[in-house]
Image: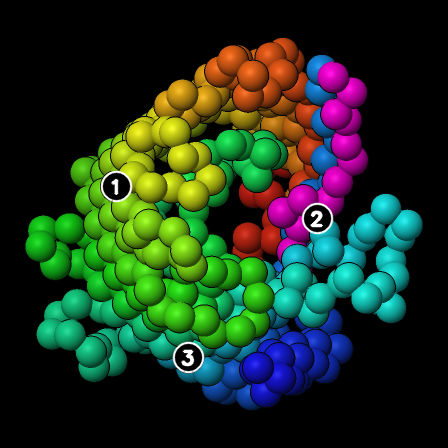
């Protein structure tokens, strides 16, 4: 699949060249009347301290996203995983074990309606996504050090090539319906066998309660066909700064958690200051793990937030080390979009 890799490199190089002239624009850099170029960096250095000496310092979930948008209708996106640049001995681009595929988290084209140009499905605004992306499944709710959550791989299916359609406003009485077909084996830039499918339905009640239902099925080589069904709830009160969430998943023939039939996660987050959030969360995986965590996150400046978290894990007999894990994480946002700044930091 060399052509696919070359196309991705060319797309990234084009966007980086276009981005050479930096502009302080909330939506990106405008190139004439039709094109907008964006570049956003999320850096998340982390440090963890665990019982048993399994300590680590990492740059997890750190990304560089480059995008080009044409008339708010077509958008091309390439997202690189910055953590793959850093190995134990530093940056080594000649490392024979370092694969180009490891750098690319997303590489997709998105087509959607703009304004009143509704050309797709009756009165339903729609988006079409094709390429390497996160497919329709799960809430995608994140707190500090989310990639360390053992449920992350259960509630997320990402870095796979596929096709997703997203419908909004009124279909089946829902506020959003998403459906995907995809390859089950991901993580590379080669299109494998398309043997997975998923659907996700979201319903919003008075802008405070969001209900999601998801279903996913896939079959990896040499394994039984897997099935997952998830039901999630999110309550969000903007005025009080309180958020509560939960999601439960039924699993059958999951390759990672073979002995588990269900998993549950949830938590409560409260904004105790315009810049400071505190939260408590829990996770349970059937026949494997129970976990509870406490955390706090502070937006120090428009581009920097720092947080700490403590988690206690109770593993099933012989499947892990019980005890506390302590972690610290900084989030550094840089770029052209509005999401590259914290809205109400401690220091302006």
Distance, label 2 to label 3, CA atoms, is 27 Å
Sequence-wise first label, 2 or 3: 2
Residue 36 can be seen, yes or no: no
Question: Mainly helix, strand or loop, the magenta region?
Answer: loop
Question: Residue 229 has which mark?
Answer: 1
Q: To which quarter of the image does residue 196 belong?
A: bottom left
Residue 217 in the image: state x and y as whole percent. Answer: 29, 53
Q: Which residue is mark 3?
A: 74
Mark 2 secondary-structure assignment: strand
Q: Which residue occupies the foreground of this view, 133 or 17? A: 133
Q: Residue at x 51, y 13 (%)?
A: 317
Judge whether 297 appears above or below 51 on screen.
below
Q: State yes or no: residue 61 in magenta.
A: yes
Q: Which residue is mark 2?
A: 43
Distance, label 2 to label 1, CA atoms, is 32 Å
Residue 29 in the image: state x and y as whole percent. Answer: 61, 74
Judge whether 124 appears above or below 218 on screen.
below
Q: Which residue occupies the foreground of this view, 321 or 106? A: 321
Badge 2: residue crowd in 10 Å (few <14, some 14–19, many ≥20): many
Residue 126 in the image: state x and y as whole percent. Answer: 25, 69
Mark 3 secondary-structure assignment: strand
Badge 1: residue crowd in 10 Å (few <14, some 14–19, many ≥20): many
Are the residues tagged 3 and 1 within 8 Å (C-beta)? no
Q: Quadrant of the N terminus?
A: bottom right
Question: Is 257 left, or right, of 144 in this rendering?
Answer: left
Q: Residue at x 46, y 40 (%)?
A: 256
Q: In the image as oriented, which residue stretches furthest toward the right?
A: 89
Badge 3: residue crowd in 10 Å (few <14, some 14–19, many ≥20): some
Judge whether 281 appears above or below 206 on screen.
above
Q: Residue at x 25, y 41 (%)?
A: 229
Tell me the magenta residue range.
52-64
Distance, label 3 to label 1, CA atoms, is 32 Å
């Amino acid at each position: 699949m060399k052509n696919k890799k070359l196309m991705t490199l060319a797309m990234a190089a084009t966007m980086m060249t276009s981005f050479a002239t930096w502009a302080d624009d909330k939506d990106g850099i405008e190139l004439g009347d039709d094109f907008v170029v964006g570049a956003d960096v999320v850096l998340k250095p982390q440090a963890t301290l665990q019982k048993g000496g399994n300590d680590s310092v990492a740059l997890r979930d750190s990304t560089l996203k480059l995008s080009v948008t044409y008339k708010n209708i077509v958008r091309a996106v390439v997202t690189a995983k910055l953590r793959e640049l850093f190995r134990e001995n530093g940056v080594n681009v000649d490392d024979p074990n370092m694969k180009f595929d490891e750098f690319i988290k997303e590489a997709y084209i998105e087509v959607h309606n703009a304004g009143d140009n509704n050309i797709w499905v009756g009165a339903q605004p729609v988006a079409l996504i094709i390429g390497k992306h996160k497919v329709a499944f799960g809430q995608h709710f994140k707190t500090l050090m989310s990639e360390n959550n053992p449920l992350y791989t259960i509630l997320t299916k990402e870095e796979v090539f596929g096709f997703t359609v997203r419908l909004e406003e009124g279909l089946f009485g829902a506020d959003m319906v998403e459906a995907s077909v995809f390859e089950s084996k991901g993580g590379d830039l080669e299109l494998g066998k398309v043997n997975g499918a998923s659907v996700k339905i979201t319903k919003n009640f008075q802008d405070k309660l969001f209900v999601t239902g998801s279903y996913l099925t896939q079959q990896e080589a040499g394994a039984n066909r897997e099935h997952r069904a998830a039901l999630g709830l999110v309550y969000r009160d903007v005025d009080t700064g309180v958020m509560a969430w939960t999601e439960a998943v039924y699993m059958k023939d999951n390759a990672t958690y073979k002995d588990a039939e269900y998993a549950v996660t949830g938590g409560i987050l409260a904004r105790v200051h315009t810049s400071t959030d505190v939260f408590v969360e829990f996770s349970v995986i059937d026949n494997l793990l129970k976990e509870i965590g406490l955390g706090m996150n502070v937006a120090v400046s428009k581009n920097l937030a720092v947080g700490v978290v403590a988690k206690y894990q109770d593993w099933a007999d012989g499947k892990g080390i019980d005890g506390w894990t302590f972690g610290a994480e900084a989030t550094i946002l840089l770029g052209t979009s509005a999401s590259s700044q914290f809205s109400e930091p401690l220091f302006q």
